[in-house]
């Protein structure tokens, strides 16, 4: 906003202009002075105020001497009742104080304020001094916008941000309110206009609507009633429309706008959106109008936010397949016992693709006025690919995806390879929404699989859960959930990081051998059965697990540093891996779990659904389950071991890979982060 | 850099690893303890140091009790002379302090530091603690990179950054030095490797070279001599090569690298570049190596910096055409009088295109070790289009351009529409390199011409001269240099902003009329001649100039705000405009100068080359020239009026449009800005 405006007045012709409350008009008095002018005097109507700079030192020296840079500063403090009801005139005098001419200025005063909820309390306050900038933190300011990525319709649905008009009144609640408050005469003086305008790049991120009918909102009750039946909204600015006139309603009025976010922050979009409103002044017949006052407001688009295992579950998602009946039954028991909802994706939809974790990631978007869950659809696109769009997108359930361009999608693009930590503090820096965790290749690898760039760019651009890149390419499937998970804990940082650990695994087997149980069998009763002694004497397996432990330790060191963890915050779970016999295209050995990978669990409050490991039985109890319970139960967690051997483990996934959990959002609001 | 590394030791097999000075190895002692271990003791060679956490409270209680989270922290303070010359062993004891096993760790200690000139003094210091981050300001840190956009060759030239190899040794001076300092045994233990690596996106911005011959630089003099004859450099990382092994030279060694910047900061590139160096450890036969130590350095690419009128000229560029002989002579006189160099672009090159200002903008790039001028080639591409590349690009003269994509290039893309202010301070914020100024359409205009997006994006991305967008679309040609310029001044902010002012123009003519000189002729002796009386009675011209003054005043208000100017910092020059009769495509009236536009001047130190206005003669002196001199001379400036009427003014340009000035760089270095 340029709050000081230069104005030229004229002794030959009266000048007319419109003044906006809060601004200052500056008139260079020498510019329009008749030749030989030496001094001047000023008269004005009571609501017009003026100052002279440089200040007149001798106030009694009337008329005032006219200097080479004498500037008149004009302000007004009340709005006009009719056009040009206020006036200021400057009289110029010659050497002998003879009158040389009068420059007359007719003024109309109006009040104009484009308003948003810049203090984030859900109410659009009047003319917040901070409305034109955005600042993070509890003492910050700046309005918030949601990407309207849900679908108000259930039939023929598509995300609302792909529709250029408003189909249903319910869609308004996904938008942010913006109010144009004006006060002044019943009409603007002839030729004046109000214009809303945005930049070309902003037009890709936002649309602004208003009711087609101009309604004075002096009678708010009547307006609210009317709005219930209003389905007729007009796009003011947005896609392909950068500027448009908006009506001036006259008197003291409020014109309500609805602002729709169209896209998430990304590599080429920082999430900030500016909307301007200008008062245009006519410049004479045939000339374009000049903006003489511009007010602006700034919004930030809500980032997409992931929910860690420590948040309360709402719904658990699994697939039903022809071979997973008993697995499904175990999950149902666990979920119902915990009191959450189970949602089953049936075969006609999943087409045999059981990897519910991999096709999508649940998150949400949040604003002071509204929030809803948003599913991030993976570019993986297995047979489950239609599920996020067809089954999840709907009213108050948003959808977003990123399509890999000119890049091969790899197994690392499955969202078992996308997780998020609980809240952490690292060297004094707070991450109250945790940090996103993904798996990639070693940066030193010549060849390697990575999460596709467009998804990585998207995740980094959300900013509020700054991602950590781990090394997961050492795994055949390549997902971080194959070697790590988080569980809630009552003490310390309120969670523990669980890591798969071949060292811890060997420790269990050596203890058995040491206790004379070397003949006990791993995989008892299965064709894979093998004695503890035989397992421990397998030097190849040992070498493979040494390598695996190295890889996990590398990740452990990164996680300790990036999440600010101590060794006491980490629990090593006894899990062995083996290297796949078949060589892959880049002939790098890659690992899979040797027995069901217990870290790949589902966490539902204090209930853990853990892949049943089929370890050696000691007095009728599985030694691995017993060890697992002894590690989890002191934290107040309850272990349920779920048999996923045939339908998941043998297909190189486990319980976590085969499920997904929609969780409650954080109570911490993202705009309160200090970034 | 992960400076703490988890390590597993083993009682069954000795462990070997390499330790990097400054890091810590952490060993979880319980992990590898034989079953039933209750306590432990440690022995090590003198150069190995260790701590135990949680700390042993009773130091005399040997052997130490083994807790569930007993961690051993190992450091070393001198490098090894031979591989694995150091050792640490852990002995585990049972209930009755009987020995259960010994875990042996063989250690090689090395020192590794990837170094840059992070303190910006032109010397690559050793292991600067800030080398991995970048901070603006005199107390900041971080190395600097140049885009190697000049051409070492004169024949068959193209910018060196488009060549993937180094053609001439002279090219090394455009690159930043980076040194890998290592210390340790003559060879790394078997299987260990050093690897340099960068990310995919960094590989678009940088290339790293080293001499093909590995030279120990203990004998620096010999090395320098050798380098004179070395033309054989190897690309280590860069385009299409993200990672590559680099040699370990043994003993105390320095390996020198040359880092070449490939692209300027832009919308998709913040200018920061990270280069990593890792030590890889073998993981056993058939397994990929693991990075066990990573050092990294950060560079920022120098922005492209423009030079305002207040900087000392070096060379003046003008075109020679078949009709501008006397203009050229006047310019030559002015330039030679001022003591600068004149460079003439001849007709075979300019093909009649005389608008030297519009085809290019001079700037420069700067680093602690080197700097050179860089021409920004406009997407205008008139008949002068080959000049910047063919005539300017060369050794220590860089070239950069931006090509408009899917966008019409308009007259606003000419660089008469791209200027830069002298240094300013605005509300306490310093702009010691000034601010870039461009002209665009009113943001409220439905249709309007703008500077093309790719050029705007480029200018904003340079950051150090934060641009200001003025409104220039009201002009037929549409360039900011048609209504504004800057001249040096001895007082106040050390400069004045000059603005064209129809009000000031009319003031001159009214004064003449008032003094009885109404019959004096504007354009005396030309076919356009018109008396002052007739000029003043032209109501249409008055209305047009009222509109023009409005447009300029809008810009005046923006410039006052964005440059922190007072009215005393601005001088109004007496210039009238007229509106073009022929309607343009969007049928908006647009203005051109009515008589030669004096603000469109060339500024060479205290010498101003001003378009000769051909105003009314009073006692043999042009009233407009007289007024102009009376405004400029008090500032110590000398006015030379140059007749550009036929070859420039009639073609809608003036002296500034027809010339360009290469100036000396700022003494302020861009990295010392506080951003
Ligand atoms: Ca919606
Ligand atoms: Ca996930
Ligand atoms: Ca070069
Ligand atoms: Ca220029």
Image (cartoon, coloured by chain):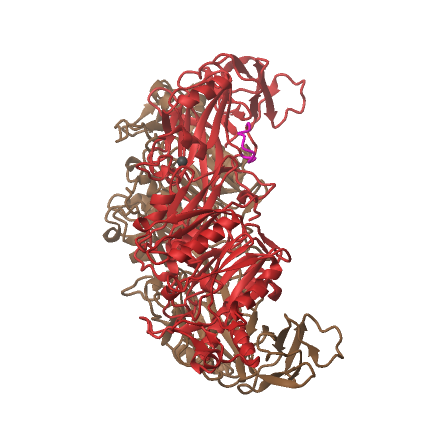
Chain colours: A brown, B red
Instruction: From this view, report whether residue A124 is shown above or below residue B1.
Output: below
Pinpoint residue B267: horizontal percent, then vertical percent. Answer: 41, 50
Pinpoint residue A498: horizontal percent, then vertical percent. Answer: 46, 36
| Residue A549 seen by the camera | no
Task: Determine the quadrant in which ligand 3 lies.
Answer: top left
- Picture quadrant where residue A154 is located: bottom left
The answer to whether residue B122 is magenta is yes
For the image shown, how many numbered marks are present on the structure? 0
- The residue segment tinted magenta is B118-126
Instruction: From this view, report whether residue B71 is shown above or below residue B108.
Output: below
Pinpoint residue B417: horizontal percent, then vertical percent. Answer: 43, 59
Q: Nearer the viewer, residue A116 or B263?
A: B263
Pinpoint residue B575: horizontal percent, then vertical percent. Answer: 49, 69
> Which residue is situated farthest in the front direction here?
B620
The answer to whether residue A630 is magenta is no
Q: Nearer the viewer, residue A426 or B553?
A: B553
Taking the image as shown, residue A325 lies to the left or right of residue B435, namely left
| Residue A555 seen by the camera | yes
Q: Nearer the viewer, residue B664 or A436?
A: B664
Taking the image as shown, residue B627 lies to the left or right of residue A379, namely right
Q: Overall secondary structure of the magenta stretch? A: loop
């Amino acid at each position: 906003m340029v709050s000081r405006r230069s104005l030229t007045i004229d002794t030959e012709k009266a000048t007319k202009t419109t003044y906006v409350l809060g601004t200052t008009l500056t008139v260079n008095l020498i510019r329009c002075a008749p030749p030989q002018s030496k001094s001047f005097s000023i008269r004005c109507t009571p609501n017009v105020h003026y100052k002279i700079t440089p200040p007149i030192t001798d106030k009694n020296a009337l008329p005032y001497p006219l200097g080479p840079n004498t500037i008149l500063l004009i302000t007004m403090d009340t709005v006009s009742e009719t056009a040009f009801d206020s006036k200021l005139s400057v009289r110029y005098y010659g050497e002998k104080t003879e009158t040389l001419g009068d420059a007359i200025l007719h003024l109309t005063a109006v009040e104009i304020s484009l308003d948003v909820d810049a203090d984030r309390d859900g109410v659009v306050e009047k003319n917040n001094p901070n409305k034109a900038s955005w600042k993070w933190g509890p003492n910050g300011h700046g309005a918030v916008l949601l990407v309207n990525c849900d679908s108000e319709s259930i039939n023929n649905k598509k995300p609302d941000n792909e529709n250029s008009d408003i189909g249903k009144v319910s869609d308004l609640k996904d938008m942010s309110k913006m109010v144009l408050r004006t006060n002044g005469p019943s009409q603007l003086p002839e030729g004046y206009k109000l214009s809303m305008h945005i930049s070309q790049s902003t037009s890709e991120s936002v649309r602004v609507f208003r009711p087609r009918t101009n309604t004075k909102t002096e009678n708010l009750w009547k307006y609210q009633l009317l709005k219930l039946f209003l389905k007729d909204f007009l796009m003011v600015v947005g896609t392909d429309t950068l500027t448009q006139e908006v009506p001036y309603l006259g008197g003291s009025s409020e014109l309500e706008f609805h602002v729709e976010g169209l896209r998430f922050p990304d590599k080429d979009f920082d999430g900030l959106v500016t909307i301007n409103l200008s008062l245009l002044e006519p410049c004479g017949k045939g000339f374009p109008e000049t903006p003489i006052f511009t007010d602006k407001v700034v919004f930030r688009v809500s980032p997409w936010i992931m929910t860690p295992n420590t948040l309360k579950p709402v719904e658990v998602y699994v697939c039903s397949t022809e071979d997973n009946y008993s697995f499904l039954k175990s999950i149902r028991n666990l979920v119902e016992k915990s009191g959450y909802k189970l949602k089953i994706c049936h075969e006609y939809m999943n087409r045999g693709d059981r990897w519910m974790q991999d096709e999508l990631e649940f998150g949400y978007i949040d604003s002071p006025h509204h929030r809803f869950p948003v599913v991030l659809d993976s570019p993986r696109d297995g047979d489950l690919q239609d599920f996020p769009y067809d089954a999840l997108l709907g009213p108050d359930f948003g959808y977003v995806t990123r399509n890999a361009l000119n890049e091969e999608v790899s197994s690392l693009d499955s969202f078992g390879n996308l997780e998020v930590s609980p809240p952490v503090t690292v060297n004094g820096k707070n991450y109250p929404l945790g940090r996103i965790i993904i798996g990639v290749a070693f940066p030193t690898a010549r060849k390697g699989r990575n999460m596709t760039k467009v998804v990585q760019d998207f995740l980094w651009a959300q900013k509020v859960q700054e991602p950590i890149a781990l090394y997961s390419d050492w795994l055949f499937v390549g997902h971080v959930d194959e070697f790590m998970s988080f569980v809630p804990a009552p003490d310390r940082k309120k969670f523990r990081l669980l890591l798969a650990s071949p060292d811890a695994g060997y420790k269990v087997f050596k203890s058995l051998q040491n206790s004379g149980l070397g003949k006990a069998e791993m995989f008892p009763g299965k064709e894979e059965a093998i004695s503890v002694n035989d397992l421990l004497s397998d030097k190849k397996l040992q070498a493979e697990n040494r390598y695996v432990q190295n890889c996990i330790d590398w990740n452990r060191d990164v996680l300790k540093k990036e999440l600010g963890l101590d060794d006491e915050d980490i629990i090593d779970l006894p899990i062995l891996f083996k290297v796949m016999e078949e060589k892959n295209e880049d002939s790098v050995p890659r690992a899979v779990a040797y027995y069901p990978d217990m870290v790949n669990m589902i966490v539902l409050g204090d209930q853990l659904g853990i892949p049943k490991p089929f370890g050696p039985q000691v007095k009728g109890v599985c030694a691995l389950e017993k060890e697992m319970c002894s590690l989890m139960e002191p934290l107040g967690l309850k272990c349920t071991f779920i048999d996923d051997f045939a339908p998941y483990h043998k297909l190189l996934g486990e319980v976590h890979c085969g499920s997904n959990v929609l969780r409650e959002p954080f109570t911490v609001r993202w705009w309160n982060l200090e970034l």
